[in-house]
Amino acid sequence: MIFKDFLPYLEEKQVRDTQNLPVFLVGMPGSGKTTIGKFLADLLEREFYDCDQMIEIKHQCSISEIFAESGEDTFRDFETLILNSLSSQKNAIIATGGGIILREQNRDLLNQYPVVYLDAPMENLFRQTQTDKNHRPLLEGDRQKALVDLMEFRRPLYLEVADVIIETKEKPQTLATHIAKWITDLEAI
Ligand code: S3P
């Protein structure tokens, strides 16, 4: 687990009050954002939100249907709207979609909040994305190649918004306890 220093963190984010801020989880599809996020929310007794799920509920259709019927740009517009509205949820734990870091506007917003990057090895991403394909149209076809290409392009963008990098080498519950400690330490500053 790699932490960025707390003080630059506070200066970078121009945060005076670290209490009550929502915490965002970012990372590639299959990195465990939703699973770890739920454990984390339980541990901290906070509300959990999943951006993709919120989009599906709001628009009453699956992510794949949005991509197929309206295109990726429209999906990204929905994603930005959800991100903006969730950022006002105090104390929330928020799992984002893997592509949230693609838009500069989203990165600018994430840079004002605590962000955890779940850095998973490629074999984990490959294994974890075998199911739930309805939700991941970008991984249709050669999934291994798609993941490698996405990772290569996106990794610097995840790192740009991350305040803590969690290498996902332990069980989701264990990782959630590490992240919970980081959040409680941060809020104690
Ligand atoms: C996407 C990841 C998906 C979902 C959509 C686009 C991406 O979320 O938002 O299919 O661009 O990586 P997960 O990261 O939960 O798979």
Image: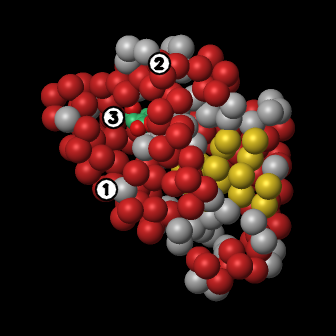
Q: Say what amino acid the circle numbered 3 marks.
A: Glu
Numbered badge on residue 143: 2
Of mark 3 and mark 1, the one earlier in the sequence is 3
Q: Nearer the viewer, mark 2 or mark 1?
A: 2
Q: Residue at x 21, y 44 (%)?
A: 74
Of mark 2 and mark 1, the one earlier in the sequence is 1
Q: Say what amino acid the circle numbered 1 marks.
A: Leu
How busy is the neighbourhood of tag 2: few (under 14 within 10 Å), some, or many (20 plus)? some
Q: Position of residue 25 (x, y in %)?
A: 59, 49
Image side of residue 10 versus residue 92, left or right? right
Q: Secondary structure at mark 3?
A: helix
Q: Position of residue 140 (x, y in %)?
A: 38, 18
Q: Position of residue 17 (x, y in %)?
A: 65, 81
| Residue of label 1 | 81
Image side of residue 117 versus residue 82, left or right? right
Q: Residue furthest left?
A: 69
Numbered badge on residue 56: 3
- Please tell me which residue lies in front, 106 or 39: 106
How busy is the neighbourhood of tag 1: few (under 14 within 10 Å), some, or many (20 plus)? some
Q: Quadrant of the C terminus?
A: bottom right
Please tell me in which quarter of the rendered image ligand 1 is found: top left
Q: Residue at x 35, y 24 (%)?
A: 137
Image side of residue 84 versus residue 3, left or right? left
Residue 7 in which image quadrant: bottom right
How busy is the neighbourhood of tag 3: few (under 14 within 10 Å), some, or many (20 plus)? some
